[in-house]
Amino acid sequence: MLSPTTPPAASCLLVLADGSRFLGHSIGAQGSSVGELVFNTALTGYQEILTDPSYCRQIVTLTYPHIGNYGVNEADGESDRVHAAGLVVRQVPAAASNFRSQQRLQDYLSANGCVGIAGIDTRRLTRILRSTGAQNGCLWALAPGEAVTEAHWEQALGRARGAVSMAGQDLAKVVSRSAEEVWTEGEWSLEGGFEKPARSRFHVVAYDFGVKRNILRMLASRGCRVTVVPAQTPASRVFDLEPDGVFLSNGPGDPEPCDYAIEATRTLVETGLPTFGICLGHQILALASGAKTFKMKFGHHGANHPVKDLDTGRVSITSQNHGFAVDAQTLPPNLRATHISLFDGSLQGIARTDKPAFSFQGHPEASPGPHDIGTLFDRFVSLMAKE
Ligand SMILES: NC(=O)CC[C@H](N)C(=O)O
């Protein structure tokens, strides 16, 4: 229960570039933030979403109305900080209740300098984004007690309209680590915490375009020693590391301007190194193979997207987070479609016909899940074993 001495929450404004206004209360840091507004329909996983580097410069609206109910903890972050440019929710329960919880979502947002708003009609916002497409917005948490004025709305609109468009932005090099790192931690379980895999059969070089930790953990748990390398690492350095396979990670922004990654991938794939890409990594593999990408209207962000495997006919429920996609009409003869989205028919997976390389648009590593398509990691390991 709220104690009678709890000060009233500070006001928070959200203004979209099209002029739509929302007034709610602050649940995070004070100040303003701009970014591309996207909506995510997952029911859980808000901490993983906030810390997913792929959300860099995006303000995330969660359509599920109760967010923060199980708190946050040290183990569940997909990176070492909050990357989302802001959080928009309907309601945060006053108490967080879970045996793993170490902090309330509100305190976590404040400590991480992330602006957040609650108390707005997220259904109205989602319907705007769905009909007009993802658009830039400005989130502005005022000082406690400060009154909202017309000048605030006007200034916020100016900031929203002045924000750079996501199309054309290379953000992989912005969020990538700057030094190489050896990764050994495996997957988490309730009984044992994070696994420390004893032996490794394969050496994988993983490109960090904004990599999520659970990807590295799933590789480690499958017997891979992983060397994580910065986004701009040239192919020559990867050859020096003598890997058995190359992994291309997820990441924020537009894949098209990532020329260094496209170039390195082309070289590595051509030499026949087994290669696996996820999300941005999937788009990079496509571009390196001669296909094209485009910006989607509002993308796919959620945890229940059905995807069909075109080889087996099997349907998997998958986690998705992308605003760009590979254009199925542009696949060259040596690239075949392996998966499609059953929501809109868009391309979800590809494989090279001439080289041991494949990739997936959604998230087989998704934590908290679903885990249906986690088998793609086993496919990568089999590919390395075969080669
Ligand atoms: N999660 C990701 O890797 C996203 C890839 C890319 N930034 C997109 O929006 O499509």
Image (tube, rainbow, N blue to C red):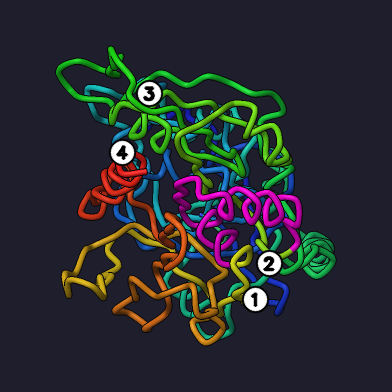
Q: Earlier in the sequence, mark 3 or mark 2?
A: 2
**Mark 1 Cα shell of 10 Å, populated few (<14), some (14-19), many (≥20):** few
Query: Mark 1 belongs to which amino acid?
Result: Ser
- The residues tagged by marks 3 and 2 sit, at their Cα atoms, a distance apart of 34 Å
What are the residue bounds of the magenta stretch? 257-286
Foreground mark, 3 or 2, reads: 3
Asked if the residues shown at circle 2 and circle 1 are in contact, with their CB atoms under 8 angstroms apart, the answer is yes
Asked if the residues shown at circle 4 and circle 2 are in contact, with their CB atoms under 8 angstroms apart, the answer is no
User: Vertically, is 356 above or below 167?
Assistant: above
Residue marked by disc 4: 385
Q: Is residue 265 magenta?
A: yes
Label 3 element class: loop
Foreground mark, 1 or 3, reads: 3
Residue marked by disc 2: 15
- The residues tagged by marks 2 and 1 sit, at their Cα atoms, a distance apart of 6 Å
Foreground mark, 4 or 2, reads: 4
Residue sitting at 50 percent across and 59 percent down? Answer: 282
